[in-house]
């Protein structure tokens, strides 16, 4: 199997050849390559245009989706070079990229719907653009719980911005949804040049999260990491209790050279339950924080393994018995062994007691000394500690 596929493109009085790696030979990657090749946002090509090929019967076949792309490759993939023509799409003159931003129509659960605003008699959505909406029929209308409105409704413009940010022209293109959004976003035609876009919020956030992760990494260009950071800031604003999103935001901030916001996001992820401290210490995305005092202080504050390490270091080791220059009597050797066992047991008890004090928030050399002075009694140690504050 070839490791790449060659294409000859006919577009705007130009003929170009492109070679696409096999692993990227899919509809979405090919469209992205076309935008790059022909100038991106300011160029001639955009995602609403059509790709045309000629099949074995001489018919001109349009490609606008992954299934159509797969059908094309099944017919033409055996050729050394696949010839394609780029033309205006079926919405020419009414491209969504040139329309207004999406209008927020409302928010609903399986039971309830809350409109974004009171509709007027002529409020049918004929403007070019996609909009999150409730279903127009078959859904009971009732007020949403106050908590849901307070938490979600203020963030709906940000949800829209997240969706629009997934497209190069900053407009939702309903007929060019990225693969990551196709499971969570369902289209419903409204009029001739408009759609309602029903968005499953959790699914959409997962899709955008995956996109952000794909953009991140120490080897990625700075602008890619900044794009990922933008997505993750929006995700954490819409879903503020997502510990993993806060952790990945910390990574993005660190990759963008922003240590202070990175530590803030990392602290938030820990407070929400993220506790893979070994990964935090070794994660290359956080490499720029390893010499940052606030990062070290954060790990020292929350990492239990670090506390255990400190406890072990604070325990006084049993001095190794020096070799005797003269042989001892057997009875004396047995007594010495018994004493060593007693000492080891005492040290174990002191260490266990100190660990309990550390878990209670008392971790210092002073506490260790008080514990020894009070013969391992936690109660007496705490009393002595309180007296020292008086």
Image: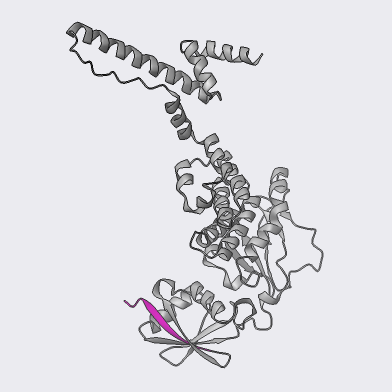
Q: Is residue 363 above or below residue 171?
A: above
Tell me the residue at 66%/55% (across/down).
139
Q: Is residue 147 above or below residue 169?
A: above
Q: Is residue 8 magenta?
A: yes
Query: How many numbered marks have been drawn onto this rendered protein structure?
Result: 0
Q: Is residue 62 magenta?
A: no
Return the residue nearer the eye: 138 or 368: 368
The single residue placed furthest to the front in the displayed view is 325
Tell me the residue at 18%/7% (across/down).
329
- Left or right placement of residue 240 versus residue 67 in this view: right
Q: Is residue 96 above or below residue 59?
A: above
- Left or right placement of residue 214 versus residue 116 in this view: left
The prevailing secondary structure element of the residues shown in magenta is strand
Please report the bounds of the magenta region as a residue range: 1-10
User: Residue 369 appears at what percent x and percent y?
Assistant: 50, 17
The answer to whether residue 29 is seen in the rendering is: yes
- Left or right placement of residue 236 versus residue 215 in this view: right
User: Residue 384 appears at what percent x and percent y?
Assistant: 57, 12
């Amino acid at each position: 199997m070839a490791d790449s596929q060659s294409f000859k493109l006919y577009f705007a009085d130009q003929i170009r050849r492109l070679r696409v790696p096999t692993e990227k030979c899919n509809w979405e990657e090919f469209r992205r390559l076309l935008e790059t090749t022909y100038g991106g946002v300011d160029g001639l090509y955009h995602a609403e245009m059509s790709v045309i090929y000629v099949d074995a019967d001489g018919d001109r076949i349009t490609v606008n989706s992954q299934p159509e792309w797969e059908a094309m490759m099944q017919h033409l993939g055996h050729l050394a070079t696949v010839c394609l023509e780029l033309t205006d799409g079926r919405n020419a003159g009414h491209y969504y990229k040139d329309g207004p931003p999406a209008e927020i129509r409302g928010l609903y659960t399986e039971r309830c719907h809350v409109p974004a605003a009171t509709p007027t008699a002529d409020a049918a959505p004929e403007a070019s653009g996609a909009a999150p909406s409730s279903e127009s029929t078959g859904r009971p209308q009732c007020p949403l719980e106050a908590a849901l409105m307070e938490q979600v409704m203020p963030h709906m413009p940000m949800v829209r911005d997240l969706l629009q940010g997934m497209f190069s022209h900053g407009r939702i293109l309903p007929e060019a949804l990225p693969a990551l959004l196709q499971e969570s976003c369902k289209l419903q035609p409204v009029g001739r040049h408009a759609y309602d876009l029903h968005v499953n919020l959790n699914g959409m956030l997962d899709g955008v999260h995956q996109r952000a992760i794909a953009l991140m990494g120490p080897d990625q260009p700075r602008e890619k990491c900044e794009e990922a950071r933008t997505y993750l800031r929006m995700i954490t604003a819409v879903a503020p209790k997502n510990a993993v999103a806060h952790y990945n935001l910390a990574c993005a901030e660190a990759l963008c050279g922003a240590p202070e916001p990175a530590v803030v996001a990392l602290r938030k992820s820990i407070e929400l339950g993220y506790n893979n401290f070994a990964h935090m210490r070794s994660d290359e995305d956080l490499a720029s924080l390893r010499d940052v005092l606030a990062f070290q202080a954060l790990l020292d504050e929350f990492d239990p393994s670090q506390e255990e390490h400190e406890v072990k270091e604070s325990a006084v080791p049993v001095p190794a018995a020096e070799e005797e220059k003269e042989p001892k009597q057997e009875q004396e050797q047995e007594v010495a062994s018994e004493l060593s066992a007693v000492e080891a047991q005492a040290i174990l008890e002191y260490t266990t007691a100190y660990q309990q004090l550390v878990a209670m928030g008392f971790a210092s050399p002073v506490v260790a000394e008080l514990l020894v002075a009070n013969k391992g009694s936690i109660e007496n140690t705490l009393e002595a500690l309180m007296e020292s504050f008086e």
